[in-house]
Image (cartoon, rainbow, N blue to C red):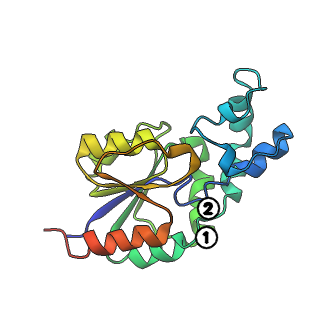
Amino acid sequence: MRYRFGIDIDGTVTCPTSLIPHINEAFNSQLTLDDIKEYDLTSALPHLEPGEFYTWFRGAESKIYASSPVSENARKILNDWKNRYELYYISARGQEVRDVTFDWFAEHAIAYDHIELIGTHKKIQAAKKHSVDLFFEDKHDNAVEISEELDIPVLLFDTPYNRLPVPKNVIRVFNWLEADEFVKREFSSVKA
């Protein structure tokens, strides 16, 4: 039996800077990834009216996802894993961007066994339902909750917005090469 990996899409498989050019264009700002200190992007745009960012995001969401670049080395590593592990993508994206998401995976030729768009950042239920053995995430509280609730390791892809301390079962990685090294070390054999 093969190990099953739960994998977040945005900020993990896609480059964490994906949103920034769209934000800068829409709000005439000059943000960089280093300016984003919280997952809630509105904290980097304090001049906006309440709800303004989310209204804009809902209208731009499909375009953003369609044009998101792949994180460096993600495609090669994920495709290398395809025959050894089950790749289950579990994303906070909603069903309204289902076609865009599947088209993006096809366009970038990224392997998957299953893609689930749950429409919420609360991924524990989906991760539990699919019995994942390892999770890949960029959202700090998700990583902590998944690791604690499911008692599995979670690889947290480092960004300026997720640098709070992490418990033992959350392992901070800085890129897909480090993630691959962890997998080779900890998940090299077939699941018992």
Q: Amino acid at mark 2?
A: Trp
The kind of secondary structure element at disc 1 is loop
Residue 162 as seen in the image, left or right of residue 125: right
Could you tell me residue 118's position as x and y percent?
46, 41
The quadrant in which residue 132 appears is bottom left
The quadrant in which residue 85 appears is bottom left
Question: As rendered, which of 51 and 126 lies closer to the eye?
Answer: 51
Which residue is at the far top?
50
> Residue drawn at (33%, 47%), measured in percent from left and top?
127
The kind of secondary structure element at disc 2 is helix
Quarter in which the N terminus is drawn = bottom left
Give the CA distance from mark 2 to mark 1: 6 Å
Could you tell me residue 63's position as x and y percent?
73, 50
Could you tell me residue 158's position as x and y percent?
50, 55
> Residue drawn at (29%, 55%), measured in percent from left and top?
153
Which residue is at the far front?
165
Residue 132 as seen in the image, left or right of residue 48: left
Residue 192 as seen in the image, left or right of residue 176: left
The answer to whether residue 4 is above or below residue 163 is below
The quadrant in which residue 135 appears is bottom left
The answer to whether residue 10 is above or below residue 36 is below
* Residue that label 1 marks: 108
* Residue that label 2 marks: 104
The answer to whether residue 178 is above or below residue 93 is below
Quarter in which the C terminus is drawn = bottom left
Could you tell me residue 155's position as x and y percent?
39, 57
| Res 124 label | none
Dots 2, 1 in contact, CB < 8 A = yes
Q: Amino acid at mark 1?
A: His
Residue 41 as seen in the image, left or right of residue 28: left
> Residue drawn at (65%, 52%), measured in percent from left and top?
65
